[in-house]
């Protein structure tokens, strides 16, 4: 084995260990001092490369925050911290552990399948105990966010998409008033340069939505009815379709025939609905604004994720787009199309590269018969981390590392890629 690689693997493992707060991993120290939903799913996969017990604990601790109706919250506030706003007092949810009241992209079932396959028989009892919670969670998506959407699900807050300030949300978010009953006390800009983070007016709207949903008692039907921000996010829907496929695999080991039939039916509906998000005039998969009913005409990295969901019809076309960007010196995968006037290569989800999106895109490309572009995206990810460190995200023009450093999900993805490199 290459001695440099060994050092790098050790560094990545050390980041997960340093961010471990007792069975759960914070995304990074101070900026994000709690357990985040989709971060933890990727981080569990990273743990699985060297500590199986710890991988299962990550998932179990996240599920300590699951609500009775099946919601897996965006944040589980296991222990108090003054480093983050909005903390549990703003959400006003009196559970133990306290949680936020919204969710994040549902990577979890895919992570459970990954960890189980990795650990084999040894993990079966753990996975069997987790499986019903995943079934409950996927049911929640249908009941709470799917009614009337023909296989798609709605997202009610940019934080739920995980791509908080994507330009895809600009128009839908502009409908949200800027008044808040909660006094805004941003902490993120105390840790990170403000020019790399969402703008102040976006935060006002983010908090307006939290105030609104708290006023609706976190009741899913009321939230759906009152939210001025309601989108069918192409990333969330693609990740959910992939997660349904992985849940079906788990159901084959742990579930009933009735569960398998229900999941199979959902997969069929989602395949058709997700394919329907392809927009020929912009040659891209686009999110849909569920208030106006119109496609959102902004090409973002979310549009590559239907490949991860197993839709392969547009694979060669999307692969060519990535190759063309790289040929122009753009680091892959920029979170917004570099030709879009709203592209900002350093501002969070308006242009930078994120390792988790790269990993999902490459997974999709590889299975879709585009191994060269898959390898290119993985090589880019390794290059950026190798040159800039385990940053939260990367400038898609210069490759510089931005945001939190020693970031858990970047370390986790690097561990997955290191294994590919070794193999
Ligand atoms: C943030 O950036 O504070 C959001 O909570 C991310 O989920």
Image (cartoon, grey):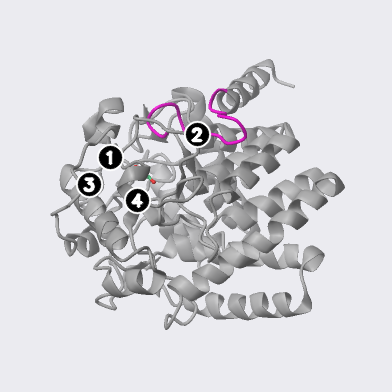
Marks 3 and 4 close (CB-CB < 8 Å): no
Above or below residue 361? Residue 297 is: below
Mark earlier in primary sequence (3, 4): 4
* Helix, strand or loop under label 2: loop
* Helix, strand or loop under label 1: loop
The disc label shown at residue 26, or none: 2
The disc label shown at residue 347, or none: 1
Mark earlier in primary sequence (1, 4): 4
Instruction: Quote the CA–CA distance across marks 2 and 4.
Output: 21 Å
Q: Residues within 10 Å of mark 1 (few under 14, many from 20)?
A: many
Instruction: Quote the CA–CA distance across marks 2 and 3.
Output: 22 Å
Instruction: Quote the CA–CA distance across marks 2 and 1.
Output: 22 Å
Mark earlier in primary sequence (3, 1): 3
Q: Residues within 10 Å of mark 3 (few under 14, many from 20)?
A: some
Mark earlier in primary sequence (2, 1): 2
What kind of secondary structure does the magenta stretch mostly adopt?
Answer: loop
Q: Residue at x 55, y 55 (%)?
A: 66
* Helix, strand or loop under label 3: helix
Q: Is mark 3 within 8 Å of ligand 1?
A: no
Disc 4: which residue: 92
Q: Residues within 10 Å of mark 4 (few under 14, many from 20)?
A: some
The disc label shown at residue 203, or none: 3
Q: Which residues are magenta?
A: 18-32
Closer-to-camera residue (222/175): 222
Q: Residue at x 55, y 51 (%)?
A: 360
Q: Residue 30 lies in magenta, yes or no?
A: yes
Quadrant (top left/top right/bottom left/bottom right) for the C terminus: top right
Quadrant (top left/top right/bottom left/bottom right) for the N terminus: top right
């Amino acid at each position: 084995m290459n001695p440099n690689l060994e050092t790098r693997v050790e560094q990545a493992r050390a980041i997960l260990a340093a961010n471990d707060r007792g069975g759960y991993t914070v995304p990074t120290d101070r900026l994000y001092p709690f357990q985040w939903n989709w971060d933890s799913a990727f981080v569990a996969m990273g743990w699985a490369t060297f500590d199986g017990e710890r991988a299962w604990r990550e998932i179990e601790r996240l599920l300590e925050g699951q609500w009775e109706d099946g919601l897996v919250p965006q944040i589980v506030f296991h222990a108090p911290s003054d480093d983050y706003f909005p903390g549990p007092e703003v959400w006003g949810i009196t559970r133990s552990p306290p949680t936020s009241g919204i969710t994040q992209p549902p990577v979890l079932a895919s992570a459970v399948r990954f960890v189980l396959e990795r650990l084999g028989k040894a993990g079966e009892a753990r996975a069997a105990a987790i499986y019903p919670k995943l079934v409950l969670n996927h049911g929640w998506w249908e009941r709470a966010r799917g009614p009337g959407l023909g296989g798609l699900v709605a997202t009610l807050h940019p934080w739920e998409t995980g791509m908080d300030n994507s330009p895809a949300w600009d128009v839908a978010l502009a409908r949200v008033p800027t008044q808040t009953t909660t006094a805004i006390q941003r902490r993120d800009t105390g840790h990170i340069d403000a020019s790399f983070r969402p703008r102040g007016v976006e935060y006002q709207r983010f908090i307006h939505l939290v105030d609104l949903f708290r006023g609706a008692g976190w009741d899913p039907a009321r939230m759906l009815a009152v939210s001025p921000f309601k989108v069918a996010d192409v990333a969330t829907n693609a990740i959910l379709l992939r997660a349904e496929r992985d849940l079906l695999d788990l159901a084959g080991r742990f579930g009933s025939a009735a569960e398998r039939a229900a999941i199979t039916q959902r997969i069929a509906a989602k395949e058709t609905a997700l394919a329907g998000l392809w927009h020929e005039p912009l040659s891209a998969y686009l999110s849909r604004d569920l208030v106006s009913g119109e496609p959102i005409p902004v090409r973002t990295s979310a549009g590559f994720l239907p490949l991860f969901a197993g839709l392969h019809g547009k694979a060669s076309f999307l692969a060519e787009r990535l190759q063309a960007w790289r040929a122009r010196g753009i680091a892959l995968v920029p979170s917004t199309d570099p030709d879009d006037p709203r592209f900002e290569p350093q501002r969070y989800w308006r242009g930078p590269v994120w390792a988790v999106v790269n990993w999902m895109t490459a997974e999709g490309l590889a299975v879709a018969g585009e191994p060269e572009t898959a390898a290119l995206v993985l090589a880019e990810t390794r290059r950026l981390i190798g040159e800039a460190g385990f940053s939260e995200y990367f400038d898609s023009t210069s490759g510089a590392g931005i945001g939190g450093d020693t970031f858990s999900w970047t370390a986790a993805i690097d561990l997955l890629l290191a294994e590919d490199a070794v193999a």
